[in-house]
Image (cartoon, rainbow, N blue to C red):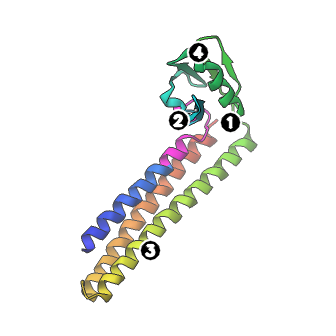
């Protein structure tokens, strides 16, 4: 029973890390990355659709993204969505492809991005702690119902804490890497 709880907790914590990874890939750094725009919602025939489903996104140069729509009629809609997003990028449309030139980040913007990353990291840590709390409560309930012994509960709590510590450390490592990437000039 405890193994099942720990397996479920590990799976849920891994999912929280994946969400963090996806969030951080959308944070702009000094170089171009398709993750910056691929989840951008585009209004396509009345349905919000991620850009990655409507176009191929390329990185021809370190500070340039190219977006080539599969359907040329979506070119203007994609351009408007990029302009209205909070990315602060100005798309250049040549009739077939949209070019996005990423200007270098100034020091103040870098610091704002680092604050944003720290906020995302804290949300991920809270998610992992909430998973730990839920799993811990499940273990206590099993112990109250006499399905596991008190010793099993103690071992389970220790294993759960080790699991939590491992994922918290992984979150910190993701944050450190992203902060280094943002502050790199």
Q: Earlier in the sequence, mark 3 or mark 2?
A: 2
Is 170 colored magenta in this rendering? Answer: no
Q: Is residue 137 above or below residue 103?
A: below
Quarter of the view holding residue 151 = bottom left
Label 2 – label 4 distance at C-alpha? 18 Å
Label 1 – label 3 distance at C-alpha? 37 Å
Q: Earlier in the sequence, mark 2 or mark 1?
A: 2
Residue positioned 42% across, 73% down in the render: 134
Q: Which mark is residue 35?
A: 2
Disc 1 secondary structure class: loop
Q: Earlier in the sequence, mark 3 or mark 4?
A: 4
Q: Are marks 3 and 2 in contact (CB under 8 Å)?
A: no
Residue numbers of the magenta segment: 21-36
Instruction: Provide residue 154's location: percent of width, then percent of height.
Output: 31, 83
Residue pointed to by mark 1: 85
Residue pointed to by mark 3: 133
Q: Are marks 2 and 4 in contact (CB under 8 Å)?
A: no
Instruction: Provide residue 125's location: percent of width, then percent of height.
Output: 51, 62
Disc 4 secondary structure class: loop
Instruction: Provide residue 109's location: percent of width, then percent of height.
Output: 72, 42
Residue positioned 61% across, 55% down in the render: 118
């Amino acid at each position: 029973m405890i193994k099942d709880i720990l397996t479920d907790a590990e799976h849920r914590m891994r999912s929280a890390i994946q969400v963090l990874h996806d969030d951080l890939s959308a944070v702009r750094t000094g170089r171009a990355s398709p993750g910056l725009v691929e989840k951008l919602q585009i209004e396509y025939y009345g349905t919000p659709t991620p850009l990655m489903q409507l176009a191929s996104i390329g990185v021809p140069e370190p500070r340039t993204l190219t977006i080539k729509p599969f359907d040329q009629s979506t070119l203007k809609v994609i351009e408007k969505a990029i302009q209205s997003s909070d990315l602060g990028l100005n798309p250049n449309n040549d009739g077939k492809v949209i070019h996005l030139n990423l200007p270098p980040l100034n020091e103040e913007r870098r610091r704002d991005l680092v604050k944003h990353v720290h906020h995302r990291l804290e949300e991920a840590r809270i998610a992992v702690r909430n998973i730990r709390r839920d799993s811990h409560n499940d273990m206590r309930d099993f112990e109250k119902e006499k399905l596991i012994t008190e010793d099993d509960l103690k071992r389970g709590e220790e294993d759960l804490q080790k699991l939590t510590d491992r994922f918290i450390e992984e979150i910190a490592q993701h944050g450190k890497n992203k902060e280094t990437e943002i502050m790199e000039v």
